[in-house]
Image (cartoon, rainbow, N blue to C red):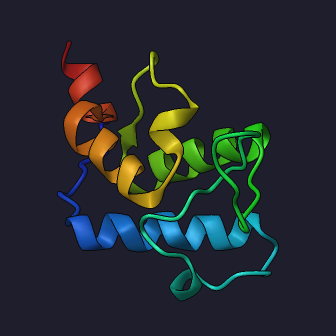
Amino acid sequence: MVEQLTAITEAELRRVIRQEIARLTDGRLRPEDIADDEPLFSVPGEYDSRIELDSLDALELSFAIEQATGMEQPVEAGWRLLLTVDAVVRMLSTHGATRQDEEAV
C-alpha cells in the first residue's frame, strides 16, 4: 500500500529543515538559532559557516527531509542546492518529487 503524503507548507518545511540541522550539530545550535540565509557549510574562499556541516551531514539532511516530508532532492542536485535553508526550500519547491509522484511513473 502506498503511503499517502499530505501537502507540507513552506513554513513547516523550513521548521523541519532547521530541526534537522540542529540535530546534526549535536544540539550546539537550536532550530531558532539558524537563519534561513546563513551558509550551512564552509567553502574555502567562498563561504564561512558557524554551523559547519560536512558532506555526510548533507546526506543525512537530505534523507531526513525525505523521511519527514516525502520530498526527495533531484539526483543532479549538488551541495550548492543545500547551502542555506532558503536554498533547500527553493530546490524542493522547484525540483522536489514525492515518493508518491515517483511511484506513479
Kindly identify the residue that appears in the image at 64 percent across and 49 percent down. 47
> Is 39 located above or below residue 20 in the figure?
above
User: Residue farthest to the front?
Assistant: 45
Q: Using residue 74 as the reference point, say whether residue 103 is left or right of it.
A: left
**Residue 3, image quadrant:** top left
Kindly identify the residue that appears in the image at 76 percent across and 40 percent down. 44
User: Residue farthest to the top?
Assistant: 105
Quarter of the figure with the N terminus: top left
Kindly identify the residue that appears in the image at 45 percent across and 37 percent down. 81
> Is 99 located above or below residue 28 in the figure?
above
Point out residue 66 in the picture as x, y percentages from the top left corner: 46, 45
Quarter of the figure with the C terminus: top left
Point out residue 88 in the picture as x, y percentages from the top left corner: 41, 48
Kindly identify the residue that appears in the image at 37 percent across and 67 percent down. 14
> Is 32 located above or below residue 52 in the figure?
below
Q: Nearer the viewer, residue 46 or 29?
A: 46
Point out residue 36 in the picture as x, y percentages from the top left corner: 42, 68
Q: Nearer the viewer, residue 77 or 3?
A: 77
Q: Count of labels shown?
A: 0
Point out residue 95 in the picture as x, y percentages from the top left corner: 26, 30
Q: Nearer the viewer, residue 17 or 99?
A: 17
**Residue 46, image quadrant:** top right
